[in-house]
Image (cartoon, rainbow, N blue to C red):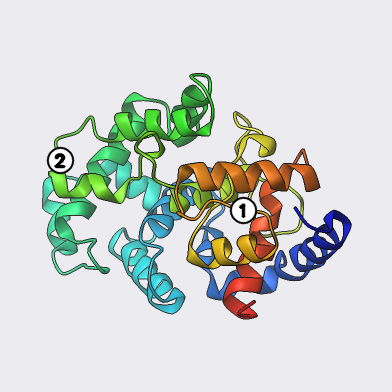
Amino acid sequence: MGNFSAIKSILDEKYLQYNSPGFITTDPISIPHRYSLKEDREIAGFLAATISWGQRKSIVQSALRLMELMDDVPFDFIMNFTENDLKRFEGFVHRTFNYTDITVFLYALKNIYQVHGGMEKVFSDGIKLGGMDHSIAHFRNVFFEVPHADRTRKHVSNPLSGSAAKRINMYLRWLVRNDGRGVDFGIWKGIRSDQLICPLDVHSGRVARRLGLLKRKQDDWKAAMELTENLRLLDPSDPVKYDFALFGLGVFEKF
């Protein structure tokens, strides 16, 4: 890494700039922020994160549509829906995520809450098996216990197969980090902030490489791990807070 103190200074400044309530309005995290119940936030957040590719405005619109189709009470809907309730989702599509996928997701979430004690418990159980890659892989295994089409498996990333799992890492950041700044929720206690892996995509990867925080060329799990290890040098207890800085520099400032 180049000039350590200069890089830390830049990223600390950008973290404070972008990790503020003003960030929420145009970001997918605005969807779980519409709710106060823990389970509503978990479900709304997971669905919003799952479809988080493409234009942010389009992501937010699609996620709001999903919430509307769930009568704006996602947890209550998940726990009580029947096969007849699925017809309303027939027209739903976001990029390659369609009716086939959302029906699997609804049944998978119902199974997680009815059988496995909820989202936090599944991820927390998984972290005991190893690092965050094992936590996500365990979640994925539980998620696909329900009957599902093969096509739907691509919508839940598997870091053990090398995926950077950007959207799941972003989701985990939302639920785990608790810095009191009003963006991330910090409502999960079974995983610590220092265990999180930085969400890595084309924007954050470009910025990280320019700053000398990432040498690996591919945006895969090994790259996400390398980036997070370097961010731990800047803040050992909360390395993923710099996701705000990398994202802001990449998307808003075209750094």
Whether residue 63 appears in this view of the structure is: yes
Asked whether 31 or 148 is in front, the reply is 148
Would you place residue 252 above or below residue 45 in this image?
A: below
Query: What residue is shown at x 32% (from left), y 40% (from top)?
Result: 109
Compared across the picture, whether 144 is left or right of 241 comes to: left
**Residue 62 image offset from top left, x and y in percent:** 34, 70
Q: Give the crowd class for mark 1: few <14, some 14-19, many >=20 residues within 10 Å.
A: many
Cα–Cα span, label 1 and label 2:
37 Å
Compared across the picture, whether 206 is left or right of 105 comes to: right
**Residue 112 image offset from top left, x and y in percent:** 34, 32
Compared across the picture, whether 19 is left or right of 152 comes to: right
Would you place residue 31 above or below residue 79 in this image?
A: below
Q: Give the crowd class for mark 2: few <14, some 14-19, many >=20 residues within 10 Å.
A: some
Asked whether 120 or 223 is in front, the reply is 223
Q: Which kind of residue does numbered mark 2 sit on?
A: His
Would you place residue 202 above or below residue 49 in this image?
A: below
Asked whether 76 or 14 is in front, the reply is 14
Whether residue 235 appears in this view of the structure is: no
**Residue 117 image offset from top left, x and y in percent:** 42, 26
Secondary structure of the residue carrying tag 2 is loop
| The quadrant where residue 145 appears | top left
Q: Which residue is mark 2?
A: 148
| The quadrant where residue 78 appears | top left
Query: What residue is shown at x 39% (from left), y 69% (from top)?
Result: 64
Q: Which residue is mark 1?
A: 214
Compared across the picture, whether 154 is left or right of 118 comes to: left
Q: Which kind of residue does numbered mark 1 sit on?
A: Leu
Query: What residue is shown at x 72% (from left), y 67% (from top)?
Result: 20
Secondary structure of the residue carrying tag 1 is loop
Task: Please give the label number shown on residue 60.
Answer: none
Mark 1 or mark 2, earlier in chain: 2
Query: What residue is shown at x 60% (from left), y 32% (from top)?
Result: 191
